[in-house]
Image (cartoon, rainbow, N blue to C red):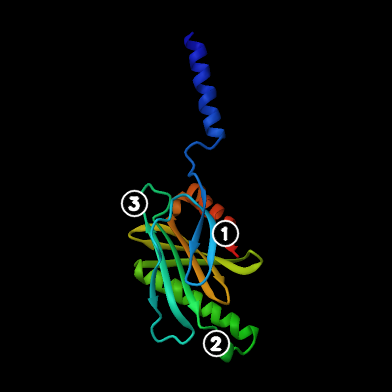
Amino acid sequence: MKKIMSASLMVLALCLLVLGCGQAKLTTQEVKGGATTLQMDLPFTLEQQAKEAAAQNNKYVTKITDNRITQAKGMDFHLTQFTTYVMNQEAMKADNKGEDSQKKFEQKALDGYLTAFEKNANATEKTRDAKNITISGKDATVTTVQCKMKGEDETLKVVFLPLPEEYWFIAFAYPKEHEDDQGKLADKIIASIQLKE
C-alpha cells in the first residue's frame, strides 16, 4: 500500500510540474492611458487609476499618465510601470519634417524615459539592447537594460509603443537571476499586448 501511495504522489507531483504549478496565473485586463487603451495578460489585478499630470515645458506633450505597481521581493516583479505621454498632435504636425525627424523624436522620447527611470530608481546601467516588435500592426520596441539597482543585478524591460495620440512605456524590473521565470513571464505579457480599438 505504501508503494502505491508513493507512486501516486510521484505521478501527482510530475503532473503538477508539467502543468506549470507555481507559475503566475495571467488574466486579460485593460490598461487605460490618457488617450488610448491597451489590453494585455497580467499576473495581478490593476486596481488603481493612473495618476495624471500636466507636462511641464513641453509643447509636444499635453499630459503624462503613470500607473506603477511596486512589489516586494519574492513577487513576480519588483516594479511594473505603465506610463503614457499624451501627444499634442497639432504641434507634432506643425513641426513634422519627415519620417527621419519623427524617428529621432521617438528615440529622444525613449532615451528620456529610460534616463528618468534610471535616475528615479538610482540604477546604474551596464548594457542596453533593443529589438523591434509589432503591437496590433504598429511598430514598437522592447529595450532590455541590465543595471545595478539597490545593490542587485536587475533586468529592466521597457516596451515603447509610439501612437499618434500618445506614447506608451511599459516597464518590468526583476532580478537578473530570475531570467528563466520572471523574464519569461515579462515576455509572455509583452507578447499579449494589443491596442484596444
Whole-number angstrom distance, CA of label 2 to CA of label 3: 42 Å
Q: Percent position (x, y) of residue 6?
A: 49, 16
2 or 3: mark nearer the eye: 2
In the image, residue 110 above or below residue 195: below
Callout in the foreground (1, 3): 1
| Most foreground residue, 108 or 81 | 81
Q: Is mark 1 on a helix, strand or loop?
A: loop
Type of residue at label 2? Glu
Residue on which disc 1 sits? 193
Residue at which label 3 appears: 72
Farthest residue toward the right?
Answer: 137
- Sequence-wise, the earlier of marks 2 and 3 is 3
- In screen coordinates, is 134 left or right of 33? right
Q: Is residue 42 above or below residue 136?
A: above
Q: Residues within 10 Å of mark 3 (few under 14, many from 20)?
A: few
Q: Residues within 10 Å of mark 1 (few under 14, many from 20)?
A: many
Amino acid residing under circle 1:
Ile
x, y percent for residue 10? 51, 22
Q: What residue did someone put label 2 on?
A: 90
